[in-house]
Amino acid sequence: MDNPQVFYLEFKTYKRNSAAFKAPDDVYQICKRQGYTKVLMPEYPHGKPKVYNKLWLATIGIHSWKKLAKLIPDESVVVFQHPQYGKRIVRDYVKKYGKEKKFRFIALIHDIESLRGGMEGIVSGKTKTNSIGDNAMLKEFHAVICHNEHMRQYLISQGFDEKRLINLEIFDYLSDVERVQPPKEAMPSIAIAGNLAKVKAGYIPKIFDEGHNQGLEVNLFGTRYEDDGINKNLIYHGAFPPEELAAHLKGDFGLVWDGLEAVTCAGNTGNYLRYNNPHKASMYLSAGMPVIVWSEAAIADFVLANGVGITVDSLYDLEDRINSISPAEYEILCQNAQEISKKLRNGYYTSSAIEKAIIAFN
């Protein structure tokens, strides 16, 4: 299968003022830069009754997959981002075209919902559908790009062929914005960016519980923040489009944490950090900002191996941990973050993983 034609399926989406579509949109853009050919798939009818959605999948959904037989030549490589709608349809046609047209399908995982189990107060877990997508469907793909070694080992435990699994290492974060990291401030400070709703980031006010971190400045960037004005150490800077956020970030480190607790990452989303690559880490690092991550998070391996941040067991340790870092040590962390930033902003990790998957077919 030398020099195969490579296609990527781009699923139309409705746009919102959030970073929810940044990761998949970046993958589409990276595929385009690599010279792969786009095949546009229809937008799923969000907000419609279940009966309408089922009818839509049985007609337009199936038709969109049938037409691939005419649009894509035999023995081509097809890149697919997971998850998407119509998991049973995808499963059936990946299997069908793999046999009949000798397509080689690559799945790039964004989330494994059967592992995360939903997001408290935001996304409900759909056990049966997610199980089909994350197991029966993905196992039909010829190569699967997963986040890291922790997720890879999880998939192997679920019966996946280890030879078909490729580690992404970290998500890319395309951006033209270059941010100069200022010197470490006298007062330790961090940035927290993303969905700031209490059901998602309930840990934020608890950073200061029991008298902890009284000398720590916490800069907040994102949506759904409820400011009670009580804690002056919490400074809300507003919400910005993901392409512009890097220019506004302020703090010595960007914090990657999840759940409702400060003593550990708890709940579905907190435990999920043991397996996934948080896109938030990529966002901070793309801006050249070192990160602080949970010591038990899967992304901690990448952070420590590349010298782009530090780990903590509990958020109560933040102020002391930051103060323990000398200006010289901090400068090294920033230099390393700048080097990784160049790769993230140019799509290095995604393009490398796809190329590895293509080579694996030979």
Image (cartoon, grey):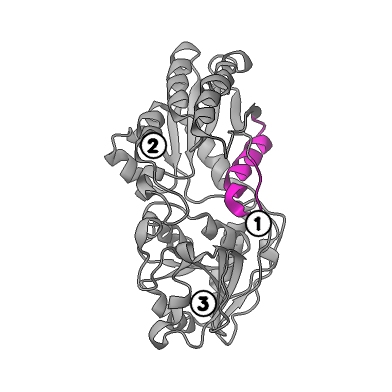
Disc 3 versus disc 1: nearer the observer: 1
The residue pinned by badge 2 equals 134
Question: From the viewer's perspective, is 297 left or right of 10?
Answer: left
Contact (CB < 8 A) between labels 3 and 1?
Answer: no
Tell me if 359 is positioned left or right of 14 in this view: left
Majority SS type along the magenta span:
helix
Q: Which of the labelled discs sits on residue 176, or is there none?
A: none
Magenta stretch bounds: 14-36
**Can the viewer see residue 256 in this picture?**
no
Q: Is residue 80 above or below residue 22?
A: above
* Residue labelled with disc 3: 329
Query: Is there CB contact under 8 Å for labels 2 and 1?
Result: no
Residue ID for mark 1: 242
16 in magenta? yes
Question: Residue at coordinates 59% horizontally, 30% vertically from top-left?
Answer: 9
Q: Nearer the viewer, mark 3 or mark 2?
A: 2
Give SS at disc 3.
helix
Closer to us: 128 or 190 = 128
- Which element type, helix, strand or loop, lies under badge 2? helix
